[in-house]
Image: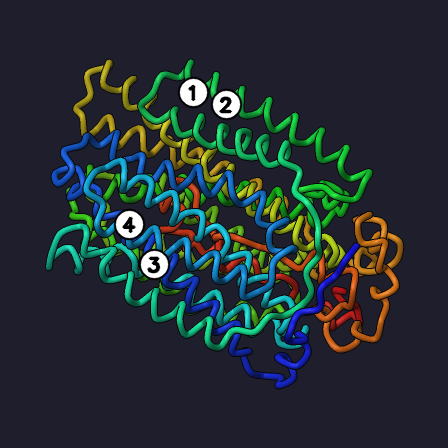
Amino acid sequence: MSVRQLDSPARSQAAVAGRTPAVVRLLVLATFVVILNETIMINAIPRLMGALHITEQTAQWLSTAFMLTMAAVIPITGWFLQRVSTRGAYTTAMGLFLLGTALAAVAPTFEVLLGARIIQASGTAVMMPLLMTTLMQVVPESDRGRVMGNVSLAISVAPAMGPTVSGVILQFGSWRLLFAVVLPIAGVITWFGLKQLKNVGETQAGTVDWLSVVTAAAGFGGLVYGLSRFEGGDARVASAIVAAGLAAIAVFVLRQLSLQKRGVPLMDLRTLRHRTYTIALILMAVSFMAMLGSMILLPLYLQNVRQLSALQTGLLVMPGGLAMGLLGPTVGRLFDRFGGRVLVIPGAVAITLALAGFTQVTMTMPFWQLLALHALLMVGLAATFTPVFTLGLGAVPPSLYSHGSSILSTLQQVAAAIGTALVITVMSARADALRSAGATEVVATLGGMRLAFIIGAVLSIVVIVTAILLPARADGPDHRGGDHHADSADHTGSADHVDSTDHKDSADHTGGADHKDGVDHTGSADHTHGADHARSVDHGDGADHTGGAVDGAERHAGVSVA
């Protein structure tokens, strides 16, 4: 299979230990702006409804369309990033983002604005995987925990700032100003990035299987959309859409199993053979469900029950988001030193305690208690997400990084949608039952929210159980031996590079077979995004974003990730 060597070996950029490579700083800045733009939209919905004369249900499509686009595009990013250069991927992502932002700023109608949001989402879906891929290539193993901590700081702060920034901007003008402010900033970052950015790693030539693309988009997009329809929609219609989505996903899985035999899957499911990765996948999915459920409930409680404004709500939850970001570097260093269990288990317990506290919300609970519970939840997530991503992706060979991270990011989207649908359905059903029993509107809503928080707390117990099952460090045998070559047939043409001396420089400089195909495409996006930026509010996302910290410190056992 033809391989193209790009213009800048990764090793040259990672030569200076203790410093974050310039290419990573540039990509973090671009990702920061992309995530910030997503979260500043949260407070703009009421303005949009008045300006464009649309209903709340119609306006919600701005979030739903973004979410569906992410769900459809993310499964394809692994394949895409293997086959284009760093500069090409950066140009594509930021170009789409700039086009969508410019179009949104001047959109004359809701339909044009909706199209602009879809274009923005297409670019956003590429940025987090691109950041994580490049980080894996240019950062030495010994520095990875520290660099990921700094990355998570920047990316966690963005969603925490978003609602507050938008509240301030909206004091000075219309909703268009949100896009008008972001556009020149993103333009300058894009120009500077293209001026400084160099290609790293290798790409692999290949064709895309369009049946896989279509079934992935229809399956995951249909599943996420169907789940979102449970909120205030017809349950039968929503169930039918979910069933159709699951059927398309089944076809997608069968197609991947067939393509794996030829070595050209769009998403390689053999990553699931690695026990640590699979446990991490379950933990991430359940914690995302619990987290995003609570992230939707808390603003609803503060605004609908406690009558706070959107700006006041943003200010109340901002300290938790900032705490999550500021803890990033510390979590990275602790992971490098002690491994994952000392962080993940206490973090999982903190998540459960915070959600259990939220089950006790009342009409008069002091705001300082709400702030403290939210901060505890964010701290628990900070201690959980980065180590879990690192342990999970560290347990698979580098040839499967792209597929492993693509599965993780896709599952985040699905888990976000399931968590959202679950809490909204539970809350609505309980509130309706209380209304029928004669309760007032506010009391019925509060009762529904408390039951939904109980569901989140119960889910979080699963997080504790899976956290206990995780090892302190990624399983050593998964990084070497037969698995390394066998897991991806399309690498066999240059498997002789896998064991080259690049191994000893850094896990990320694996020659030939690995980096032309499969460096980490964690994405996320983000984080992180699930119900738009309930995703991002919290994607604070960290997940998202904190997340893709692939592989911190396998060096302690003398095990190279590559």
Q: CA distance from mark 2 to mark 3?
A: 31 Å
Q: Depth check: 198 or 139 in front? A: 198
Q: Quadrant of residue 69?
A: top left
Q: Quadrant of residue 225?
A: top left
What residue is pinned by disc 3? 36
What residue is pinned by disc 4? 103
Q: Residue at x 46, y 40 (%)?
A: 416
Q: CA distance from mark 1 to mark 4?
A: 31 Å
Q: Nearer the viewer, mark 3 or mark 4?
A: 4
The amino acid beneath tag 1 is Ala
Q: CA distance from mark 4 to mark 2?
A: 32 Å
| Disc 4 packing (10 Å; few <14; some 14–19; many ≥20) | many
What residue is pinned by disc 2? 242
Up-down relation of residue 433 to residue 274 (above or below):
above
Mark closest to the chain's N terminus, 4 or 2: 4
What residue is pinned by disc 1? 238
| Disc 3 packing (10 Å; few <14; some 14–19; many ≥20) | many
Q: CA distance from mark 2 to mark 1?
A: 6 Å
| Disc 2 packing (10 Å; few <14; some 14–19; many ≥20) | many
SS category of the residue bearing label 4: helix
The amino acid beneath tag 2 is Val
Mark sitting on residue 405: none
Q: Nearer the viewer, mark 1 or mark 4?
A: 4
| Disc 1 packing (10 Å; few <14; some 14–19; many ≥20) | many
Q: CA distance from mark 1 to mark 3?
A: 31 Å
Q: Residue at x 60, y 55 (%)?
A: 81
